[in-house]
Image (cartoon, grey):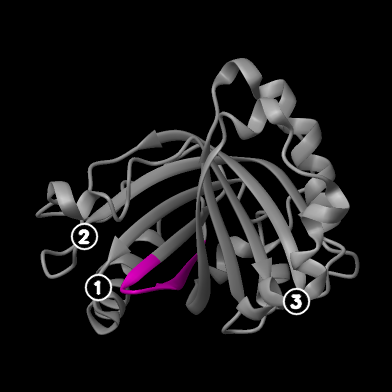
Amino acid sequence: MGGGETGTWDALARFEFGAGLLHVRSDLPVAIDGSLTPWSDRYHGLVLRVPGVRRVRRFELVGAFASGEPGPTADEAAEFPEPARFLTLYDLKHPDVLKTPEFLGLTAIGGPVPPQLAAELDGIRLVCRERHRWPSISVARLFPAGDKLLHLAVRGDDRAVERWLRSEAVPALLPAVGAVGVRWFDAGEGRHVVLCELQGPIWPLPPTVTHDLGPAVWSAYRQDYVRDAPGE
């Protein structure tokens, strides 16, 4: 799949608080990976021309961790299904970028998904707004940010999620070797996405999600594509 130079945490720092994130999870059989790369690279090049789109990154799943306690019931698990093989993140100036004519017209410009992909590609899309970020300043000065990602999807009350992040999760993650920063996004309807940016060979053990939150799924992704919009 496509490559690219990794940006720095300083680049993310230029994204205003309240920035948007289009979060797309998808699965694809290994046998047709060769069809995905050229199409998605062309499509993402078009996306980056849309005003308000800041960066596109694509990740591939490398592992999953146990979910938080007490664990989802069968009905709750549908909120956050098993981690998808691919994760694509579109950093936006604000979520309303997705409603602009330029973004809505991308399919007409770039063409539909090729038939061999459309039959297999299964995507789950979340439109998120950033709530907070915690950079690890000392590490950010030495390493480029985020060639790996520790990803959490969790459901819960905003105040309970924030309390857990500030008191338990962020203090556990930021001191870990290779941790560059943590970003928290609100995905609406009680859904939250937490992204721990990582650089280096070590995966920190993700902190246990507290019992007062709902279903939670930790997963680990490795970045294989990153592009910034012109001027970013």
Disc 1 residue crowd, few under 14, some 14–19, many 20+, Cα 10 Å? some
Residue 214 screen position, x and y as percent: 19, 63
Give amino acid for label 3.
Answer: Thr
The label nearer to you, 2 versus 3, is 3
Contact between labelled residues 1 and 2, with CB atoms less than 8 Å apart? yes
SS class of the residue under badge 2?
A: loop
Q: Report the predominant secondary structure element of the magenta stretch.
A: strand
Q: Where 179 sits versus 137, above or below?
A: above
**Cα–Cα span, label 3 and label 1:** 35 Å
Q: Is residue 153 left or right of residue 9?
A: left
* Residue identified by numbered label 1: 164
For label 2, the crowd category at 10 Å Cα-Cα, with few meaning under 14, some 14 to 19 and many 20 or more, is many
Task: Determine whether, in the image, residue 49 is placed left or right of residue 210.
Answer: right
Instruction: Name the secondary structure under disc 3.
Output: loop
> Disc 3 designates what residue?
100
Of mark 2 and mark 3, the one earlier in the sequence is 3
- Residue 187 located within the stretch drawn in magenta: yes
Q: In the rendered view, would you say 39 is above or below 207? A: above
Tell me the number on the disc at residue 209: 2
Q: What residue span does the magenta drawing correspond to? A: 181-192
Counting from the top left corner in percent of width and height, residue 36 is at 70, 31
Please name which of the two marks, 3 or 1, marks the residue nearer to the observer. 3
Q: Does the rendering let one see residue 79?
A: yes
